Image (spheres, grey):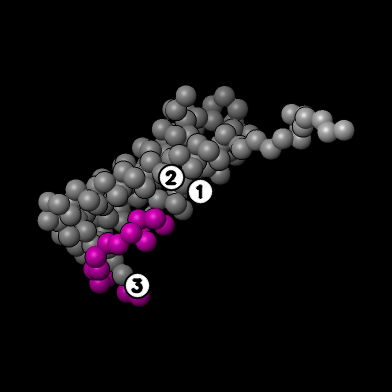
Amino acid sequence: MMTAPTQSQTRSTNPLFLSGLLGWIAALAGSLIIAGVTDLLGVQLEIAAPPDMQTAVPLTLTPILFATLVPSIGATILFGLLNRFAGKNAARIFQIIAIVFLLVSFGRPFGLPVALSSKLALAAMHVVAGGALIWALTLRK
């Protein structure tokens, strides 16, 4: 005779994982929108290319995917650890850390050997990605 699975037998998706995934999707979507708008405005988005990181190359989808995915994973892990060890202050501590990381992240686009319009668009992508992660992990109800 079959019985219905109990609560402990059913698999549930971790809400933190879902929030991190939502943050990544929002960060990626926002960054792609900025890339699309700059393209429509005729601004060539460029990034530095290996090996010397002094050669500017056009920005493609792959760097945008990784530049949003890696911080999303890191932010989700950090927020999970803060939830575990910082209790009710986890969200506030995470927001402060995220804003500091966002401010530090501006060094990269503004240090690139590219046009100012490209630097500003890349910095806007950082703001959108950081804001999306902060929203998804700590502000979304």
Residue drawn at the location 25% of the way across and 72% of the way down: 55
The image quadrant that residue 24 belongs to is top left
How far from the left and from the top, in percent, is residue 79?
54, 38
Depth check, mark 1 against mark 2: the one in front is: 2
Depth check, mark 3 against mark 2: the one in front is: 2
Secondary element at image label 1: helix
Amino acid at dot 2: Trp
Choose between 84 and 104: the one closer to the eye: 84
How far from the left and from the top, in percent, is residue 101?
40, 45
Give the farthest residue toward the right: 1
How far from the left and from the top, in percent, is residue 103?
33, 44
How far from the left and from the top, in percent, is residue 124?
26, 45
Q: CA distance from mark 3 to mark 2?
A: 25 Å
* Disc on the earlier residue, 3 or 1: 3
The reply to whether dot 1 and dot 2 touch (C-beta < 8 Å) is yes
* Disc on the earlier residue, 1 or 2: 2
Amino acid at dot 1: Ile
Query: In this picture, which residue range is highlighted in magenta?
Result: 50-66
Relative placement, left or right, of 50 versus 139 is left
Relative placement, left or right, of 51 versus 44 is right
Q: Which residue is mark 3?
A: 50
Relative placement, left or right, of 37 versus 79 is left
Q: CA distance from mark 1 to mark 2?
A: 8 Å
Q: Which residue is mark 1?
A: 73
